[in-house]
Image (cartoon, helix red, strand yellow):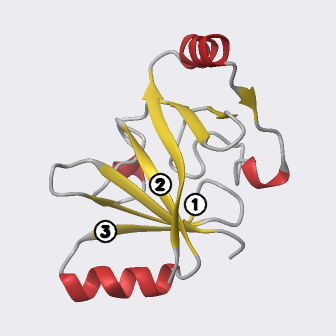
Amino acid sequence: MKFHFHHMNLCTDSLPRLTQFYKTLFDLGTIHDEEHTRVNFDRNSNGYSGDVDFLTDGAIEFHWAERDLDTGFKLNQIINPMARGHFCFRTDDIKGFMRRCDERGIKYSDYGKWAIAGWYQVFLQDPDGNVIEVHQPNM
């Protein structure tokens, strides 16, 4: 099982303000490709009611998202990745990762194929409560 850092997500109450700040200060570009499309643009059908801007410095991705304190409740999940934000690791074996968590007694929320087309997403918390996403693409 391989892992590599994939992206950082920040949640905000003003998406245009946050996006403009990072784009102009750090010369971040916008990502426009098939992988970075929302699964369903009906704003409430997937439990998340916000918009997301996908940015990059050419190497690292940044996902700036409108804060939604109710996403976890709407999806009956314990962990809400859209309240404060999270960072993400990409893996080539999401089921193996979930087994690893189970073996270690680490609780996680299995969001499945939820927000990004083809990404199978799992969210968990580190010992300090920071939210971590682990996902496998092309599932």
Circle nearer the viewer, 2 or 3: 2
Distance Cα–Cα, label 2 vs label 1: 15 Å
- Percent x, y of residue 106: 22, 74
**Residue tagged by mark 2?**
88
Snapshot quadrant of residue 77: bottom left
Are there few (<14), some (14-19), or many (20+) residues within 10 Å of tag 2?
many
- Percent x, y of residue 54: 67, 36
Q: Is residue 29 above or below residue 99?
A: above
Circle nearer the viewer, 2 or 1: 2
Are there few (<14), some (14-19), or many (20+) residues within 10 Å of tag 1?
some
In this view of the protein, which residue sits in the foreground, 44 or 135? 135
Earlier-in-chain disc, 2 versus 1: 2
In this view of the protein, which residue sits in the foreground, 92 or 95? 92
Task: Classify mark 2: helix, strand or loop.
Answer: strand
- In the rendered structure, the answer to whether residue 103 lies left or right of residue 139 reads left
- Identity, as a three-letter code, of the amino acid under mark 2: Cys
**Residue tagged by mark 3?**
108
In this view of the protein, which residue sits in the foreground, 37 or 1? 1
Q: Is residue 96 above or below residue 119?
A: below
Snapshot quadrant of residue 28: top right
- Identity, as a three-letter code, of the amino acid under mark 3: Tyr
Task: Classify mark 3: helix, strand or loop.
Answer: strand
Residue at 67% over, 33% down: 57
Earlier-in-chain disc, 2 versus 3: 2
Q: Which mark is residue 114?
A: 1
Circle nearer the viewer, 1 or 3: 3
Q: Is residue 112 visible?
A: no
- Percent x, y of residue 70: 37, 40
Q: Is residue 55 above or below residue 28?
A: below
Residue at 75% over, 27% down: 29
